Image: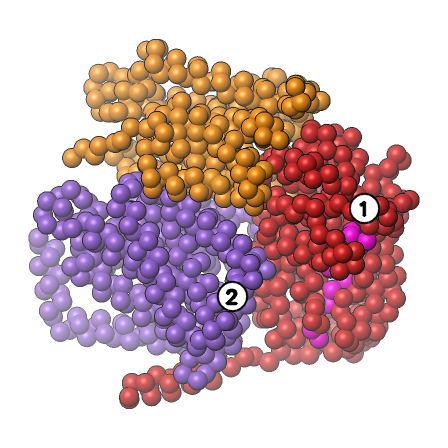
Chain colours: A red, B orange, C purple
Amino acid sequence: MKLWKRLALGFALATMIAAPAIADETQGVTDDTIKIGIIGPMTGSAAIFGKSVFGLEALYKQANDNGGINGRKIELVREDSACDPSRGIAAAKKLMAQDKVFMIHGAACSGVALAMKPEIVKDGIPYVIMSAASAAISTPAERNIFHPVPTTVTVANTMVDFVMSRGDITKVAVVAHSDEWGKSNRDPAVARLKEEYGLDPIVDLTLERGQTDATPQVLQVRESGAQAVIGMLYPAEMAIFLRDSFKYGVRPPTFGNMAISLNDARDRVGNPEAASNLFAFSPFAHATDSEEMKEWAALINKYYPDERVENFSYLGMGGTVAVIEALKRAGRDLTRQSFIDAMNDIKDFDTGILSANLTFSPEDHVGLRGGAMSRLGEGGILVLKTWAE
Amino acid sequence: MLFQLVLSGIAQGSIYALVALGMTILFRATTIVNFGHGEFFMLGAFLVYVLLHVVGLPFLPAALLAIVLMFLLGMGLERGLFRPMGESAPHISLAMMTVAFSFLFRGIARLFWGREVYPMPSVFSYPPIEVAGLIVTSQDLIIAGTTLLLVLLFFVFFRYTRLGRLAQATSQTARGASLVGINVPLVHGGMWGTAAAIGAIAGILVAPITLLYPDMGGQILIRSFAAMTLGGFGHLGGAVVGGLLMGVMEQLAGGYISTALIDIFAFLVIIVVLLVKPSGLFGRREAAHV
Amino acid sequence: MSELTEVTRQQARPGVRLQRCAVAALLALALLLVPLVTNDYTQYVVNSILVYALAAVGFNVVLGYLGQLAFANAAFFGIGAYTVALLMHYAALPFPLALGGSAVTGALVGLVVGLPALRLKGYYLAIVTLVFGELMRWAYVHGGDITKGSGGLPVPEAAMFGVVADTDKAKYYVILAVVAAVIWSTNRILRSRVGRAFVAIRENELACASLGISPGRYKVIAFVWSGLVVAVAGGLFAILLGRISPESFNLHQLLLHFAIVMIGGIGSLVGSIMGAVLLTAAPEILRNFPGLEEIIFSLLLIAVLLFLPRGLAGLAARLVPALKERLYRE
């Protein structure tokens, strides 16, 4: 008995030593700087999505060059998550406890964002998502987490509505990865098909990451007579699916989500004809090869001349424009709360790059609820709202 | 659909067979299981990419040069990493060394090419050919053809040429071989080089299909293990038959049972074979010598 | 022979024993006071080191002491993590019981892996265990609503003796207590007759059999214990992260454990701890040089394989010969 009592006492003492440090409302803010932590997959299997980080940083640097925010310059601290949850947690903790940043802007991998979420909620630090799309991050809403990119639910709904907008579609095939990313994209799409249109997918297939051949999937799509294929796939696997579809003469159009860039897909497939039937979800107002987008690309290249700008580079930029606006609106008296209040005040805000305007409120931190689809047309990329166009 | 799946399975399986062939040759000659073979595959493909796009060579010279360079790399590995470890090194350590260099190469590749994925130009013309309702591409034919050719070549090599029998002798007893005057390190070096070169050939042929990324070797490694296990470790023909069977079975399982199975199919095969008949289809049961 | 008498003589002298007790007490005190000098981030890193040290110790039992090339570590680790998570999430079991549950599952799975190990030799065992780990990962991904697939399973906070461990510093004490206890037990086993049998089997299995030491029995014991230890480490991992998902138990995880054991020193418990410190702290130190980590690890591994067969422990033994007997088993 004595031993147990001693241990319990020891534990109680230990927890007193271990009491959490209380974070400061103005942590990361000095008279002339605001420290912002950026997290992205700079290495590892999802490193291509790390390109979004450069978009963020270019905008923050531009804000500094334009005079800063209310007399303060933004200081950036970048951390690599390698798309690994435990690395992401370590990165977030470092930014919060060691670098003591004011806010965190980051995460392209939903797994990382979800892993970091409990720590971030507990700490209360403002957190703005860069490009991770899982709806679970921001629903239910947390006081300090903001989601300025379309969630998987928004994307799925947009895709399904687009497909069905042609009016004569009854057979829709679904092909997806079986990992978290794939499931969080596929499930809302299948749900939308069922709830809004009363349809089940005519075939519901898996294509795993890293697979180099999609013959069984393509043949099943062919046998099923599907009129459209919703593909929740990463860029490499989408390219393989398109290539094999072309090879076996399977022609129904394929619809990809936010992870697909039309130019990138066309390059990967190596055959423009095979990629001609591809539609991709577009969170952007303009086609990625348009003059307007070229300005954004030029901005990134101004600060990162060696960076090859891709569709993914722009993903987090709309959110960054909003963050900079909110920081300005919060004024000189910048605290976590004043920043959060300013974000909650963002209504119908035109970021200049996103296809819909951003709106936040204290109850709803999912900023975007719309989008469009794009495809490769004769003269370049077309952005479409309905299929009939 | 059945025949198309089988055909596609043969094409896929030829890839596995080609890679398994390279691994088996090395295993036969040095009794080392090379967990880094996938990286030979990957490096071969990236080398050709660099030679094509950075140096500007046309395809055939680039491919040939890449193969030669990989051969030299293989020899270099043997000289630098494995020879110092000595013949009496425990298998654990040898296997671990292969794991170590596998990660080293992956890390280096990631450093240069980690952020993007690179498309390779197709080795040969693209439009698929239709034969009696079945579709096949020239790519598939080339891969299957090359695999067959290489298998025959090595079969002849090991069975009928002097060098081949020397290689077999050194693998069975290195000490005995050197007593007879065989230059064991040279033979080993040559075998490593050959394995690397074959891995590179597979990578070059297959890269236009799989696209280039630093982790491309890992996927193929597991499937090749399955092929080798199925066919019987160390048996050349077995590796090829195992690879083809793996390819076909994977496609059929994916087409008829569930596409979700394709990913773990190789694992199931390995476990079933090793638990039921570890020597695989063609392997011999090994006796442990005291 | 003379070494043996030297050691026994040292053990007998009371002065030396007092010295050893003092060192141990100082070490214990230092460990207990660690949270005074850390922030949340560095504490998290320290916690990770402890968890990985335990995983490596478990791996070492089979890899280093028994000498079998068995790569089931990622599987044991994952099974331990998911057991704790599932028991706490669905059955609302308190942490100590959940951890006990993962120890039991780990031991059972160790048994399952150990039995084929009797028949399969060398590379075959390596491949089968590797594949087993990947199959388990597939199971987590496709475990539907139970494991919540790739979405990840949230882990409720651990509570011990009525105190909830919800900060990194509090978790430290929980993790430290468990890791210390398990490593101590492992050490006892390895220094007993059982441990000597492992080493004997590693050196010459046939000789053992002819001497009446049943290799089969001891191999299974080794796997069972290894499974238990690594599963417990997995359970601690679940508490550490607060949320587990299948990707955390892939080949990369296995290779990390493996590198820790090899670089730390095969057949040395202290080596595993040293390896864990190096390989867990290194990525954090290398944060400013993304992408170099893999290269440095593999170079380290190659260096160890070529020049330091006994790893860091061997290096330490060379530098401080007096520690040699304590550090590894020949």
Q: Which residue sits furthest right?
A: A389
Residue C293, image x, y percentages: 51, 49
Q: Residue at x 34, y 47 (%)?
A: C70
Give amino acid for label 2: Leu
In this rendering, would A18 be left or right of A306? left
In this rendering, would A358 be left or right of A231? right
Residue A148 belongs to magenta span: yes
Q: Residue at x 68, y 20 (%)?
A: B130
Residue C169, image x, y percentages: 48, 75
Residue C74, image x, y percentages: 42, 53
Query: Crowding near pointer 1: few (<14 within 10 Å), some, many (20+)?
Result: few
Cα separation between marks 1 and 2: 45 Å
CB of mark 1 within 8 Å of CB of mark 2? no
Residue A43 visible to the viewer: no
In this rendering, would A194 be left or right of C308? right
Q: Residue C57 occupies which quadrant of the picture?
A: bottom left
Residue C114 belongs to magenta span: no
Q: How many marks?
A: 2
Give amino acid for label 1: Ile
Q: Kindly identify which residue carries mark 2.
A: C241
Q: Kindly identify which residue carries mark 1.
A: A169
Q: In this picture, is B144 found above or below C202?
A: above
Q: Tag on residue A361?
A: none
Q: In this picture, is A382 found above or below B199?
A: below
Q: Chain of mark 2?
A: C
Of residues A242 and C275, the one nearer the viewer is A242
Camera-nearest label, 1 or 2: 1
Q: Chain of mark 1?
A: A
Residue A341 visible to the viewer: yes
Q: Residue at x 56, y 44 (%)?
A: B258
Magenta residues? A142-161
